[in-house]
Amino acid sequence: MAISTATKAATDALAVNRAPVSVGAQEVHRWLQSFTWDFDKNRTKYSTKYKMANDTKEQFKLIAKEYARMESVKDERQFGSLQDVLTRVDAANRVHPKWNESMKVISNFLEVGEYNAIAATGMLWDSATAPEQKNGYLGQVMDEIRHTNQCGYINYYFAKQGQDAAGHNDARRTRAIGPLWKGMKRVFSDGFISGDAVECSINLQLVGEACFTNPLIVAVTEWASANGDEMTPTVFLSIETDELRHMANGYQTVVSIANDEAASKYLNTDLNNAFWTQQKYFTPVLGMMFEYGSHFKVEPWVKTWNRWVYEDWGGIWIGRLGKYGVESPASLRDAKKDAYWAHHDLFLLAYALWPTGFFRLTLPTAEEAEWYEANYPGWYDMYGKVYEEWRARGCEDPSSGFLPLQWFAENNHPIYIDRVSQVPFCPSYSKGASTLRVLEYNGKKHSFSDQWGERMWLSEPERYECQNIFEQYEGRELSEVIAEGHGLRSDGKTLISQPHTNKDGKLWTLDDIKKIGCVFADPLKAL
Amino acid sequence: MSIEVSGGRRGLTDPEIAATILAAIPDQPLETQRKMNYFVTPRGRRLNEYEVLCCYTQPTPDWIPGGLDWGDWTQKFHGGRPSWSNESTELHSTDWHKHRDPAFRWHALYVKDKAEEWRYTDRFLKAYSADGHVRSIDPVWRDEVLGDYLGAFGFSEYGLFNSHSSVVRDCLGDTLRMSSAMIGLDKVDNAQMIQAERTFLAKLVPGFDESTDVPKNEWTKGSIYKGARETVEEIWQGTYDWNEILFSGHMVYDPLFGQFVRREFFLRLSAYYGDNLTPFFINQMQLYHSQTKGITTDMFHTCLADDPEFGDYNKRLLRAWSDKWLPRTVNALKDFMGIFAKIPEIKGVTSKDAIEAALERVFDDWQRDYADPIGYKVDTSALIKTVLSGLK
Ligand SMILES: [Fe+2]
Ligand SMILES: [Fe+2]
């Protein structure tokens, strides 16, 4: 239409119609796919063996301003609850002490995953070619910033309002001391950001989010609320509302590469590696946090695991992707074995290394021992007995001079660390699937606990060179390591970590540890 | 009572559970230091909520300056390239965690502002249309300038937006990463609001073409945005150093080219052509520009140029980067001068003297706020002369 005709038509139209008109997000979004253009250098900075299709669409069609509107509505609700009614009823001081400790770890470690997911989805935003697909990842970049801040808010709130601020107030510094941290970084940090972009997406979205987010974010709210914690459900359920978008991103990633020849060659291997990587840490750690980090139990971890991981994810979710050639990972069966015992094995080691934590741990009580035995027959003979012995030797009492770590040395049960997952294991005293494998490469020894990690290392050893805590701390005395890592409370002498949550129990100091004279050794050197 | 609780019983409200919990809680809090992140150096006098929620969320090892963690990465790229590393940028810092958004916006504050802007945009558009205001816009300005050239400028914003993806992946600090994502989102927001304005016009003006075809053709094949497009392509995809991407985009190209196009062309001229709609959108973009300027000058001036150990080195490199990106930006502006031949002339507004004055404002601002702080010597009148040589 020529300009003058259009003008006249506009004037005529306005003469009869003055209805207020605006523009909706969808009306803008429908042009998004055309925002890009072709040019020579237009390719991703992060190589991938897959090719993402140029016409990939997204499911959540948001524009920047509409995204902001939706999120800020959720924020108002969530922060309103926290700052208003939960503070007035002093809710942070109505949480079971054991759970107060667990949230030091859960919220901070989840924060690490959220934080690294910002960078991970930044990489995917770069790798995707279709503007809609880029937009989906962008939405996730922003969400993960939100979640990072939200997880921080939990620790911030518990520190400000709660019964024991130590650890909540400095987790970002003290987390680096202990044995759970490096494994954490593998699954929630490097596993999301370092590698083939699609492989990272599989780790983050297809496994991390679609598989472990449910137990991590949803189940945790049930355990929290049973133990008096209403802060965590308030925040985590608000996080969860964004996760659907992220799972959709993972799904779209697979759809975008489905027609690529590389997918038929590599996708199932990448998925199997990603599944094993994530489960190797989360299966034991989540089970341990729930069962050993609570007083009131919701259900045995193995049941939760079977429902969310084995049936929902391994069956339904992966089943939906079957038409794109995706198969259930081969390692799922080994993982199922781990779901029964691995968290019990890990707690034994975590408790033995309690002085390196940034939280207080608690030995199972008599009624808990009964619950464990009822749900995991054989538990007492393997673990219960040992805890009884440790307790009898005074492991909770600072004047005893006894650290459970000594028990492992006395009984010749060396603790190793798996090079690939960085998860500690004790091959001579465990019921889980771990077995010791030692390989030498470039004059250095490496221990492994399972065939799947070993395979990953064998094909690409240069990706897994990280030293473990025993190599790092070798020859150093325990109290020195704790002090250097800032593992002390504000009085400058009491440890943040403690081997009990008994309100009348004595608290250990750095001197109590120093007196014992515990020196780190690298078990690989003894082989 | 049994320790296994079922049926969704809640510890806060179930009397039996609550009693067990209360009995276990220590009589006195065990720790008196209640301030999270108490060990962080605050930018202002006291640690604020932004610093509590954002600082050290990144697990950086201590061999990347400012990090609190230790050791190697637990998984690396194929071939062994590290997750994050000092080699990802030529600039040096004693502390990559030092940057702060001067507005101290963490996620909730950032989206709250933008949500308000969106709600207000919706109300404004309804009032604008009900008022019949669109009748006053000069038809050439409306159909050609807004339809084609404003539309084409959207691609500049969209390209700059995409330049942030690798920055969000690669940069070395948490506050840097969050700021980069936010200023990136503002750029795609600009591109989307340009499209929103065009869609809005299409609803009011029968025959107005809202499709992106013509603007895209202008952007990719036309002469007016040729220099701009080539520069944006190089910032977005030709550059790997994340600091150089931010610097070229936000410290050279956008404060010169972006400012001229938005402020001195669309914002200044629209009123003369009876257009009170475009200023509404451009003013939002100018707000984002000023917030971004606060962020990037904190990154490059407060943190890097004033770094206690590497300040001099950094300033030298920033000057070298300015040498690289300034001529391209000047060339982009020179090409853009072609637009003045496309609009009905208004004496003293679109004539050469007025254009020169507008360029002077932009270059003077740039010299004062961007060049001087890093000791970059620039002959603005020579640059303006070069730009003006593009007038047809
Ligand atoms: Fe998240
Ligand atoms: Fe997520």
Image (spheres, coloured by chain):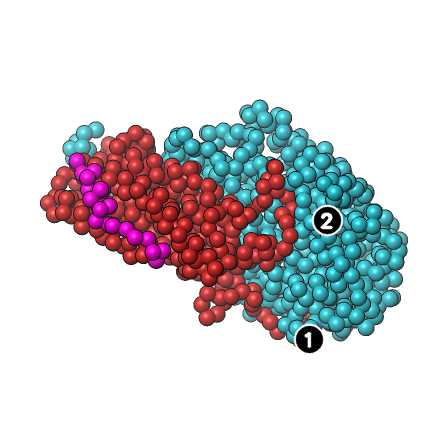
Report x, y in % for residue A305. Answer: 71, 45
Q: Can residue A91 be seen in this view?
A: no
Amino acid carrying mark 2 in the image: Val
Report x, y in % for residue A202. Answer: 60, 38
Tell us which disc is closer to us: 1 or 2. Answer: 2
Does the magenta segment cover residue B381? Answer: yes
Q: Mark 2 lies on which chain?
A: A
For residue B274, side relative to residue B258 (left or right): left
Q: Which chain carries label 1?
A: B
Chain shown red: that is B
Secondary-structure class at tag 1: loop
Name the residue that disc number 2 marks. A423
The front one of A193 and A139 is: A193
Q: Residue at x 53, y 29 (%)?
A: A51
Q: What stretch is highlighted in magenta?
A: B373-392
**In this view, A448 is above or below A78:** above
Q: Is residue B40 visible?
A: yes
Cα distance between the residues tagged 1 and 2: 37 Å
Secondary-structure class at tag 2: loop
Report x, y in % for residue B220. Answer: 32, 31
For residue B92, side relative to residue A103 (left or right): left
Amino acid carrying mark 1 in the image: Asp
Other residues around mark 1 within 10 Å, as few (<14) / some (14–19) / many (≥20): few
**In this view, A251 is above or below A213:** above
Name the residue that disc number 1 marks. B27
